[in-house]
Amino acid sequence: MALFSKIFAKLRGGSVTASDWNELRTSLIQADLGASLSDELIEIAKSDKYDGVEAAISSALKGALTQAPRELALATSRPTTILVVGVNGTGKTTSVAKLMHLLNSEGKTIVVAAADTFRAAAIEQLQTWGERIGVPVVAGKFQGDPASVVFDAAKRAADERVDYLIVDTAGRLHTKSNLMDELSKIRRVLEKAGGVDEVLLVVDATTGQNGIIQARHFTQSVGVTGLILTKMDGTAKGGVALAIERESQLPIKFIGTGEGADDFKAFDADAYISGLISSE
């Protein structure tokens, strides 16, 4: 990503023109930092352009990220319940599968609810992953009642006293009230079964500022607690994480960086900032 390497090189040279600042502003906005944050960063650079500008900008970038915990919330006397939501095409079901794989590799026991009953492929994908790594996947009939699937999965998770219950849901447009109501129903089922510890919204990094809108609507409907940012593979616009966190104040908890099972990890804010300002 290294969004700032070019301007840092010019600052070290001691001569920066108005055209250079405009070029930087354009590049930052194109990288999805947003106009407001881009302007703030440029003002910081202008006010301290010969002494410690890299440290100043690094500090400003860190300040744009939320201070909310990035670790998964954990239940103490029942399975930790994670509800995964998002719009179509963000990589939601794949993220559920990768999260399943990550937790399983850490020795955790898991039950997965394949509650995206509107896509047979989503159910099959999770079942395939479950069989491969030895994680039970509770599924219902294609186009069946997703709340029923969630109820059965919650019961199994409780009976088997597993560490985690992960619930996949149908991808939906945040503008469709009936679909959001269905998501609220699923949450109510989980609340009756014991509670919901995390609601993770999957956001495609390449959608840019639209991710902020998605976060706002899903939070209003189901109380999002954190984000999974997908397609952060180097081609994505690197500043989107800053923009989404700054506007939503929701912590990014995981990022997906590729298609492989291991291309999924906890979000490291320090490493992310370092990547933005690195000259390499």
Image: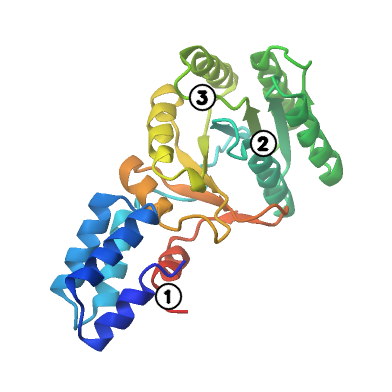
**Which of the two discs, 1 and 2, labels the residue nearer the N terminus?**
2
Residue 214: assigned label: none
Return the residue at label 3. Answer: 173
Q: Residue at x 16, y 76 (%)?
A: 48
**Residue 3, how many percent across, how many down?**
39, 67
The amino acid pointed to by label 1 is: Ser
| Quadrant of the rendered image containing residue 138 | top right
Q: Tag 3's secondary structure?
A: loop
The Cα atoms of the two marked residues, 3 and 1, are separated by 37 Å
Q: Residue pushed farthest bottom? A: 13
**Residue 206, how many percent across, how many down?**
50, 47
**Residue 84, how many percent across, how many down?**
58, 33
| In the foreground, 183 or 92 | 92
Q: Residue pushed farthest front? A: 19
Residue 93: assigned label: 2
**Which of the two discs, 2 and 3, labels the residue nearer the N terminus?**
2
Q: Residue at x 31, y 75 (%)?
A: 7
**Residue 213, how many percent across, how many down?**
38, 34
Mark 1 neighbour class, 10 Å CA radius: few under 14, some 14 to 19, many 20 or more: some
Return the residue at label 1. Answer: 278
Q: Residue at x 46, y 14 (%)?
A: 177
Is 109 on the left-hand or right-hand side of 205?
right
Report if the CB atoms under discs 2 and 3 are less than 8 Å apart: no
Number of marks drawn: 3
